[in-house]
């Protein structure tokens, strides 16, 4: 839709009607979709947990980086054209590249992050800092 220059007074209704019937642009569907990667994030009294689906990937293919208070988990898909002896009849496991990042609150201790991977599920655990754990205060 184009810009309307107002040289005389139009009501908002006049502008809406003019824009509705104006055919300068066609509606197009977006071509770049954002694919959400399957991730579960939850917290308990011990810390913060991430469960990230990594079906068909190995531990060595996944890159986990901690920079200041940013946690980044990524995988870059390699070209499969290198293996000419292999003829694929059906490919059902996507193995898409992903680059996930989260800003982690200071109450979690990123330096003590733990990562395990079993059955295609990457599990990350970030413990709470000792200062942020709940404390019991006795009344004097």
Image: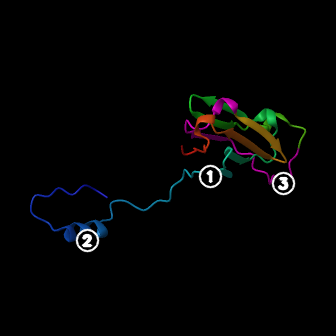
Q: Secondary structure at mark 1?
A: loop
Occupied quadrant, residue 12:
bottom left
What residue range appears in magenta? 87-112
Between the C-alphas of marks 1 and 2, the distance is 37 Å
Occupied quadrant, residue 104:
top right
Across and down, in percent, residue 101 comes to 60, 39
Task: Using the image as rendered, state which of residue 41 and residue 121 is in the foreground.
Answer: 41
Q: Which residue is mark 1?
A: 36
Across and down, in percent, residue 7 comes to 10, 58
Left or right? Give the position of 99 relative to 16: right
Instruction: Identify the residue at horizontal 59%, vertical 35% (top origin).
Output: 131
Q: Which residue is mark 2?
A: 17
Inspect the magenta stretch and tell me whether residue 92 lies in it. yes
Looking at the rendered image, the disc whose residue lies closer to the viewer, 1 or 2, is 1
Q: Which residue is mark 3?
A: 90
Inspect the magenta stretch and tell me whether residue 29 lies in it. no
Q: Main secondary structure of the magenta part?
A: loop
For the C terminus, the image quarter is top right
């Amino acid at each position: 839709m184009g810009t309307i220059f107002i040289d005389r007074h139009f009501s908002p209704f006049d502008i809406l009607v003019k824009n509705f019937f104006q055919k300068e642009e066609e509606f197009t569907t977006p071509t770049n979709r954002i694919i959400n990667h399957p991730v579960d994030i939850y917290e308990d009294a011990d810390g913060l947990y991430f469960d990230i689906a990594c079906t068909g990937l190995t531990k060595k293919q996944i890159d986990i980086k901690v920079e200041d208070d940013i946690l980044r988990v990524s995988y870059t898909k390699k070209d499969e054209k290198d293996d000419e002896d292999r003829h694929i009849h059906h490919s059902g496991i996507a193995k898409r590249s992903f680059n996930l990042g989260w800003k982690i609150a200071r109450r979690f201790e990123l330096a003590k992050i733990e990562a395990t991977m079993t059955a295609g599920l990457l599990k990350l655990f970030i413990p709470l800092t000792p200062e942020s754990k709940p404390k019991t205060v006795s009344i004097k």
